[in-house]
Image (cartoon, rainbow, N blue to C red):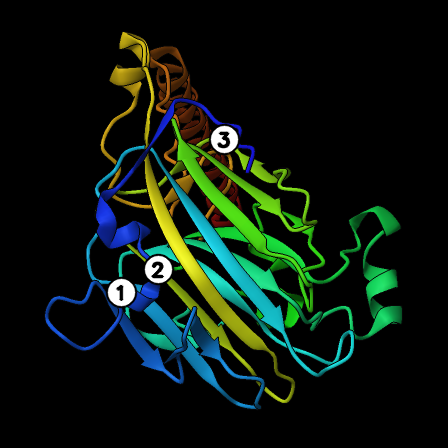
Amino acid sequence: MGHRGEGQRVPVCSCYSKLFLTSVGSSSSSLWDLMGNAMIMTQYVRLTPDMQSKQGAVWNRVPCYLRDWEMQVHFKIHGQGKKNLNGDGFAIWYTKDRMHAGPVFGSKDNFLGLGVFVDTYPNEDKQQEAQKRRYSPGNQRVFPYISAMVSNGSLAYDHDRDGRPTELGGCTAMVRNLNHDTFLVIRYVKRRLTVLIDIDGKHEWRDCIDVPGVHLPRGYYFGASSVTGDLSDNHDIISLKLYQLTVVRTPEEEKRDKEVFLPTVDNMKLPGVEAPLEPMSGLALFLIIFFSLVAIVFAVVIGIIIYNKWQEQSRKHFY
């Protein structure tokens, strides 16, 4: 498979690069935990079967402390439902918390970290007329759709709008019921997040998401989760492989690349994170104080004049 990238790719110990078959289970030596309806099959982990109201997940037990990394996901989505009569998709996670079920593709909302969503059902777009009124043709999305989101813990995923308000970027990806392998790659290098897909059976990566200025803390966990509702699909994870990327940084880049403690994205306001106000200059502060004092003195003088006139009129009236 052809691969484009920055720096050299180094597999990170067998605990990440093995197929699930050899590293999933309940024993103390297992490196992945299953949750919900997820099942170990012969060649893959099935997050959810093609049945209604199921949810499942698989999470790594070992936090990732790499600065630059790449996660390759080999997956398959298939089922009996026709187009737009299937759902709901799955998510790949890099988050502080693990093993918490919830409404966002089977995992918790208001998470801390990164979520990459392979969404197969258009919740918002099911009302075509409303969608056409809200968005121009160039902004309308075609499903299945892959998107990414970074949350600082106070940012919620809008399920009814398919995550559009918090989407960092995305692309259409026809990934259901294919007879060839389907892959996606999540790459995090020099605070830049990119997602590429190989879904056409051509062994070529295609750009999907490219966002600079993404700040993700180290020590978070990788996982995958899925959920079905009234509609369903088989959501299978064949492998998750993590690679360390060796990247050369200039001294200036090293100086700027400080440790991150809260997930953020440059130039994107997240609820709960207020932009710091710029401090006033000395001249501006002086002018504000000066004109405030002038206004106070002026008000006092006017008050004294009005009071004296009132007293003078009162004395004339008395005599």
Mark 3 highlights which residue? 212
Q: Are marks 2 and 3 in contact (CB under 8 Å)?
A: no
Q: Nearer the viewer, residue 314 or 196?
A: 196
Mark 1 or mark 3: which comes first in sequence?
Answer: 1
Q: Position of residue 26 (x, y in %)?
A: 18, 77
Q: Residues under labels 2 and 3: Cα distance?
A: 31 Å
**Left or right: 125 as drawn, with respect to 94:** right
Question: What amino acid is found at the position of numbered circle 2 in the picture?
Answer: Leu
Label 1 element class: helix
The amino acid marked with disc number 1 is: Thr
Q: Nearer the viewer, mark 1 or mark 3?
A: 1
Question: How many C-alpha atoms fall within 10 Å of the one at disc 2: few (<14), some, or many (≥20)?
Answer: some
In the depicted view, which residue is nearer to us: 133 or 38? 38
Residue 272 to residue 81: above or below: above
In this rendering, the answer to whether 237 lies above or below 193 is below
Q: Secondary structure at mark 3?
A: loop
Label 1 to label 3: alpha-carbon separation: 36 Å
When asked about the image quadrant of residue 289, the answer is: top left
Q: Amino acid at mark 3?
A: Pro
Q: Are marks 1 and 2 in contact (CB under 8 Å)?
A: yes
> Going by the image, does 185 lie left or right of 276?
right
Q: CA distance from mark 1 to mark 2?
A: 6 Å
State the residue position of label 2.
19
Question: Which mark identifies residue 22?
Answer: 1
- Residue lying farthest front? 42
